[in-house]
Amino acid sequence: MVDPSLSGIETVKIAETADRKFRKELSAGITSLALLSVLNHADEPMYGYQIAKLMEEDEKQSVPLVKHGALYPVLRSLEGNRLLTSRIEPSVSGPPRRYYDITDKGREAFRRWMVIWRRTSKLIDRILGGVPDDKAD
């Protein structure tokens, strides 16, 4: 219920703040899973901008799921947890690039996280009414 003492602008600002917080919290784990997925399916190590371009949403979206700048802390965190490795190589067109590659430990984590993601998304879809309860699992 909307607080009647709030103006329309205040109500909109509160909703926008809540939406940003929800997206940020939801994005945290999804970004890690998506990064591992991209690198798990890559034929060779990739640099951050390459990964970011693959993860861009449809141009019609007003708010991207993951901002380019948000990827780099997650990449460093995954590397710190030994799920990724990286190396720096010179670039002919600009500064050196850091290339990321998934480790065996990263591939194992990706497989486990996919199971968790599928179970969680199925549950949330069912709770939200999007998917009927499937007893196949």
Image: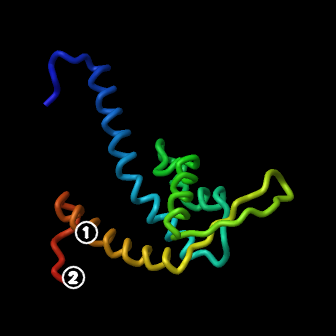
Q: Horizontal placement of 57 versus 12: left or right?
A: right
Which structural element holds mark 2? loop
User: Which residue is painted at 64% across and 78% down in the image?
Assistant: 43
Query: Does residue 115 lie above or below 8 as drawn?
Result: below
Which structural element holds mark 1? helix
Q: Horizontal placement of 129 versus 33: left or right?
A: left
Q: Position of residue 129 (x, y in %)?
A: 18, 60
> Is there CB contact under 8 Å for labels 2 and 1?
yes
Q: Residues within 10 Å of mark 1 (few under 14, many from 20)?
A: some
**The C terminus: image quadrant:** bottom left
Q: Residues within 10 Å of mark 2 (few under 14, many from 20)?
A: few
Q: Could you tell me how far apart the alpha carbons at marks 2 and 1 are, in whole angstroms?
A: 10 Å
- Kind of residue at badge 1: Lys
Q: Camera-side residue: 101 or 10?
A: 101
Residue wearing tag 1: 122
User: Which residue is painted at 56% across and 69% down in the image?
Assistant: 84
User: Which residue is painted at 33% across and 68% down in the image?
Assistant: 117
Q: Horizontal placement of 38 versus 44: left or right?
A: left
Query: Does residue 94 lie above or below 8 as drawn?
Result: below
Q: Horizontal placement of 45 versus 61: left or right?
A: right
Mark toward the start of the polypeptide (2 vs 1): 1
**The N terminus: image quadrant:** top left
- Kind of residue at badge 2: Asp
Q: Position of residue 131 (x, y in %)?
A: 22, 67
Q: Position of residue 74 (x, y in %)?
A: 51, 56
Residue wearing tag 2: 137
How is the structure coloured here?
rainbow
